[in-house]
Image (cartoon, helix red, strand yellow):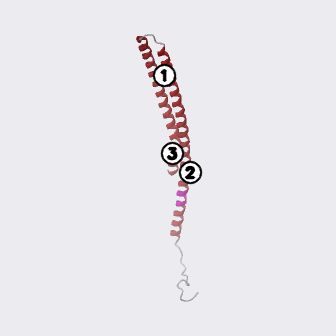
Amino acid sequence: MSATDPFSTVVPFQVPEQVRAFAEKGVSSARDGYLKLKEAAESNNGAMEAAYTSASKGASDFTVKMIDIAKTNTESAFDFAQSLIGVKSLPEAFELLNAHARKQYEVLTAQSKDLTEFAQKVATETVEPIKASAAKTFKLNA
């Protein structure tokens, strides 16, 4: 190195202990924050996967229920049509029609109630992993 090189002379300087302690505390705090954030992100990913799995299964089960309902209602309609073919008078046809309508109203009411309860159950099961993860995340951050 030449004497004209401005970097050839090193001026020793020492960092005050308070600055060093402050920097170390900042690094430690940043590391802790990062670890908490990483853990929360991993937990949330698991919660989202569980919610997706629950929603997918719920949608599949809901489809099966809808197919069963359609099958039941179609069979009922065919049974009614077959009964209607054997009617001998108009009053008998109206009586059969009224009885069928009452029965279908009861069946549809029960089916609607069943679907509503099932949808609520699926929604609760789908949201539960997210709710648990959020509670855990807020507990970690508290």
Q: Is label 3 or label 1 in front? A: 1
Magenta-colored segment: predominant secondary structure: helix
| Location of residue 7 in the rendering, given as x and y in whole percent from the top left corner | 54, 83
Crowd rating for badge 2 (residues with CA inside 10 Å; few <14, some 14–19, many 20+): few
Q: Is residue 115 above or below residue 15?
A: above
Residue at the location (54% across, 57% down)? 34
Marks 3/1 in contact by CB < 8 Å: the verdict is no
| Location of residue 121 in the rendering, given as x and y in whole percent from the top left corner | 51, 34
109 on left or right of 7: left
Residue at the location (52% across, 57% down)? 33
Q: Is label 1 or label 2 in front? A: 1
Q: Which residue is mark 1?
A: 77
Judge by depth and name the residue closer to the eye, 97 or 118: 97
Q: Which residue is mark 2?
A: 42
| Location of residue 77 in the rendering, given as x and y in whole percent from the top left corner | 48, 22
Q: What's the distance in space between the residues labelled 1 and 2, CA to CA?
A: 52 Å
Q: Earlier in the sequence, mark 1 or mark 2?
A: 2
